[in-house]
Amino acid sequence: MRPLHIALASLVAAVWGVNFVVIEIGLDHFPPLLFSALRFLVAALPAVFLVGRPKVAWKWIVGVGLVLGVGKFGLLFIGMDRGMPAGLSSLVLQVQAVFTALFAALALGERPGRTKVWGMGVALAGIGVAAVDEGAGGPVLAFVLVIAAAACWGVSNVLTRKASPPDSLNFMVWVSTVPVLPLLGLSLLFEGWDRDAEALAALDWGGAGIILYVAWITTVFGFGAWSFLLSRHPASSVAPFTLLVPVFGMTSAALLLGESAGPLRWCAAVLLVGGVALTSSSRPRGPRATLVEGTVPVEGSEQSPPAPEGAAPVRTAKGG
């Protein structure tokens, strides 16, 4: 890769990592479900009028929109609102690679090789260490919610593999239209009209900037830049940069939020990142393995679309 493209890939990883800090700050402005709804609303508009008609069946757009938007991001935002630290969230979410491999084996017949199985074991060991670290001084329920968000991410990755979108940015923009109304409805039901109205009435430049960052910077710029890189380089060259996401996430959380990371958390980070690297390093085997090798990247996922990110066909990148 050219130095400029290496810098761009690193910038995308940094944007996705810092996003967890921005989410944490945003939760001081908005209830979690309303915040998630606003994020998808702004990501979809006005982009939905610029990317053209959907290029896959609506069942895939709706399915991924509900599982990813309502499930993954709803649970992630609630978990962080309940006390899950931003840096640890950026790390724990990487276990989605393990969930993706497991669900792909069950739903698509992709048999994981020995290296992938070892990687899954190492990553799960990292989750265990992180659970011990968080359980010693943090809210266990929040930790479990973020794990559940990672599981939803894994399901959405498998659904996206089935959809095999020819244009990941087009797909993601249309997917972003789906969660808005369900999340708003859930927000009104569980967070209440008064709380939502108060948050919207108090919207200031800081709150607006947060919404714009999580919607336009992490989604529109992040996916667009990632698509640009995948259209010009093999996925095996681009995908490893996603392993920088928890590094940027934990570092920015320490610098900007004062989050401390003890030996157990760094041990968990080494195990998780190493396990995810192993899980993502080998191709699955089985009848469906050669059909589709990847999915749409979502804020630091190792997954990338199997089809063009513009016009030229690209290799795939091997995934709350």
Image: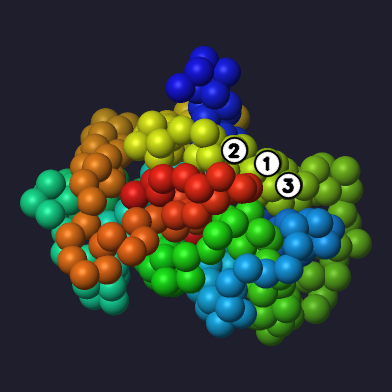
Closer to viewer: mark 1 or mark 3 = 1
Please provide percent x and percent y for residue 126: 23, 46
For disc 3, the marked residue is 216
For disc 2, the marked residue is 228
Please provide percent x and percent y for residue 160: 46, 67
Question: Marks 3 and 2, Cα distance to the nearest angstrom?
Answer: 16 Å
- Above or below, 10 against 215 in this view is above
Q: Specify the quadrant of the image occupied by residue 227.
A: top right
- Report if the CB atoms under discs 3 and 2 are less than 8 Å apart: no
Q: Which secondary structure, mark 3? A: helix
The amino acid at mark 2 is: Phe
The 10 Å Cα crowd at callout 1, few under 14, some 14 to 19, many 20 or more, is some
For disc 1, the marked residue is 221
Say whether disc 1 or disc 3 marks the residue closer to the N-terminus.
Answer: 3
Is residue 45 rendered to the left or right of residue 254? Answer: right
Please provide percent x and percent y for residue 301: 44, 49
- Report if the CB atoms under discs 1 and 3 are less than 8 Å apart: yes
Question: How many numbered dots are placed on residues in this image?
Answer: 3
Question: Marks 1 and 3, Cα distance to the nearest angstrom?
Answer: 6 Å
The amino acid at mark 3 is: Trp
- Report if the CB atoms under discs 2 and 1 are less than 8 Å apart: no
Say whether disc 3 or disc 2 marks the residue closer to the N-terminus.
Answer: 3
**Residue 72 visible somewhere in the drawing:** no
